[in-house]
Image (cartoon, rainbow, N blue to C red):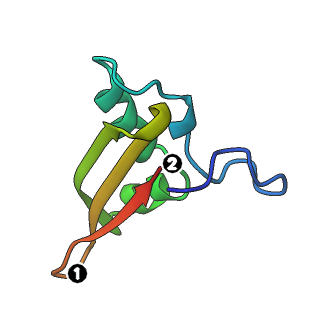
Amino acid sequence: MTVRRGKIPVAPLIGNDLHLIVPGTKTTQAEVEEAVRTAYPLREYLAAGLVETHSVRSESGPHGRLLVEYEYRIVGETRNRSASSS
């Protein structure tokens, strides 16, 4: 959740596109959910059925930053986990 897609030169597909989203618009939440769902390698884990999404929350933070929390469960476990990005 903290790596921008393309930031790692030798692994340009790893990461997310959250930095491209403008906070505070009527489409922000939908864009955040899509960016999380398509982040690599998370999209691979979701497609393989290894993790389940519990929730994706976003809000505008200080200085116009986008704050995101992704809550998920690893299949077969009983507790939820979360990952954040700011």
Mark-to-mark CA distance, 2 and 1: 22 Å
Is 76 displayed left or right of 10 in the figure?
left
Q: Is residue 32 above or below residue 16?
A: above
- The tag on residue 86 is none
- Residue shown at the point (65%, 54%) measured from the top left: 14
Q: Nearer the viewer, residue 15 or 20?
A: 20
How crowded pointer 1 is (Cα within 10 Å; few <14, some 14-19, many 20+) is rated as: few
- The tag on residue 76 is 1
Q: Nearer the viewer, residue 82 or 42?
A: 82
Q: Residue furthest right?
A: 10
Q: Residue furthest front?
A: 63
The mark lying in front, picked from 2 and 1, is 2
Q: Residue furthest bottom?
A: 77
Kindly check if marks 2 and 1 are in contact, taking CB atoms under 8 A apart as contact. no
- The amino acid sitting under disc 2 is Ala
Q: Position of residue 13 (x, y in %)?
A: 68, 48
Q: Position of residue 19 (x, y in %)?
A: 56, 36
Q: Nearer the viewer, residue 8 or 47?
A: 8
Instruction: Identify the mark nearer the N-term, 2 or 1.
Output: 2
Q: Is residue 32 above or below residue 67?
A: above
Q: Which residue is mark 2?
A: 39
Q: Is residue 42 above or below residue 32?
A: below
Q: Give the SS element for disc 1.
A: loop
Is 74 displayed left or right of 22 in the figure?
left
Residue 65, can we see it? no
Q: Give the SS element for disc 2.
A: loop
Is 54 displayed left or right of 4 in the figure?
left
- The amino acid sitting under disc 1 is Gly
- Residue shown at the point (26%, 45%) measured from the top left: 57
How crowded pointer 2 is (Cα within 10 Å; few <14, some 14-19, many 20+) is rated as: many
Q: Position of residue 47 (x, y in %)?
A: 39, 55
